[in-house]
């Protein structure tokens, strides 16, 4: 008797082919139904995303264009300032402040607007410009100490010694200020101008002690000699021996 081999039945998965096809059709049907139900919100969301992306690209291009224009004007204005043409310098830097207030050149523009007014002796306008810088760009760590120094000089020009001292002290309150030595010197000078000789001497001596290598320390030594009635301290060219003529 011939024995037939028994062929094992294939194990069926949890779903047969017909079940899978049914599930796919069901998913497709539900997806179409979902899209039909939320078609308008989905389309709106897609359009909004496109608008946002396009807007971001456009803003970036516009910002780049604006910065480039401001830089060109800044270069021209700075040259005017170096030439001593303060009115033209003022006009050009003001154009940056008015038209390109959001550009990278704006902080520099405000600073030099103040400097131009200061050079022209228009102290109130200079003070307004420097205070405008402080209000808008106080995070500008490089320029801020210089703004306070020049703000103090503008107040000094008006003989407003209290505000001048306050401006110079603000320089000293800044961390790692690169013009701290000059601020001490200017503070001492304001004390001297106001008639407070004792405080002036104290600040000049503080400057010499704290910043011995500073050129402002040499100026302080000369001022101290004058205030104390001592013989002047000769520095620089004054120490060079006089050559005999043949």
Image: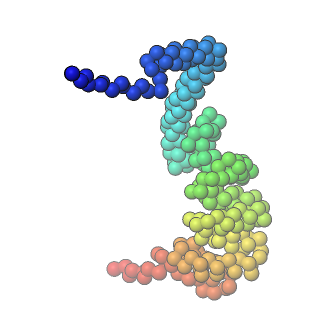
Residue in front for this viewpoint, 106 or 10: 10
| Residue found farthest to the front | 1
Q: Which sits in the foreground, 196 or 24?
A: 24
Q: Residue 228 versus residue 103: which sits nearer the camera?
A: 103
Residue 16 vs 77, above or below: the answer is above
User: Which quadrant of the figure contains the C terminus?
Assistant: bottom left
In screen coordinates, is 34 left or right of 164?
Answer: left
The single residue placed furthest to the left in the displayed view is: 2
**Image x and y of residue 28, in percent:** 53, 15
What residue is drawn where x is 60% and y is 47%? 107
Total labels drawn: 0
Name the quarter where the N terminus is drawn: top left
When asked about the image quadrant of residue 17, the answer is top left
Colour basis = rainbow
Q: Nearer the viewer, residue 145 or 61?
A: 61
Identify whether 62 is placed above or below 245. above
Choose top left, top right, bottom left or bottom right for residue 211: bottom right
What residue is shown at x 59% (from left), y 57% (from top)? 141
Q: Is residue 219 above or below residue 178?
A: below
Residue 186 drawn at (x, y percent): 66, 68
- Is there any visible trace of residue 114 in the rendered image? no
Residue 40 vs residue 62: left or right?
right
Identify which residue is drawn at 44% across, 80% down: 240
Residue occupying the point 47% across, 81% down = 239
| Residue 217 seen in the figure | yes
């Amino acid at each position: 008797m011939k024995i037939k081999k028994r062929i094992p039945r294939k194990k069926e998965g949890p779903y047969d082919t017909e079940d899978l096809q049914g599930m796919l059709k069901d998913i497709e049907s539900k997806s179409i139904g979902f899209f039909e139900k939320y078609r308008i919100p989905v389309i709106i969301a897609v359009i909004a995303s496109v608008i946002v992306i396009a807007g971001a690209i456009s803003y970036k291009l516009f910002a780049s264009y604006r910065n480039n224009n401001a830089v060109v004007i800044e270069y021209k204005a700075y040259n005017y300032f170096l030439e001593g043409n303060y009115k033209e310098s003022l006009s050009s830097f003001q154009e940056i402040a008015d038209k390109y207030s959001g550009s990278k050149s704006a902080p520099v523009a405000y600073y030099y607007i103040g400097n131009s007014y200061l050079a022209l002796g228009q102290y109130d306008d200079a003070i307004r410009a420097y205070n405008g810088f402080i209000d808008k760009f106080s995070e500008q760590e490089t320029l801020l100490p210089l703004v306070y120094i020049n703000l103090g000089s503008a107040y000094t020009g008006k003989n407003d010694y209290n505000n001048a001292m306050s401006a110079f002290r603000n320089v000293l309150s800044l961390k790692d200020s690169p013009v701290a030595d000059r601020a001490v010197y200017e503070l001492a000078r304001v004390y001297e101008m106001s008639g407070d000789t004792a405080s002036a001497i104290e600040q000049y001596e503080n400057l010499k002690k704290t910043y011995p290598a500073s050129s402002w320390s040499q100026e302080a030594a000369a001022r101290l000699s004058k205030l104390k009635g001592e013989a002047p301290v000769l520095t620089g060219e004054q120490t060079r021996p006089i050559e005999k003529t043949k």
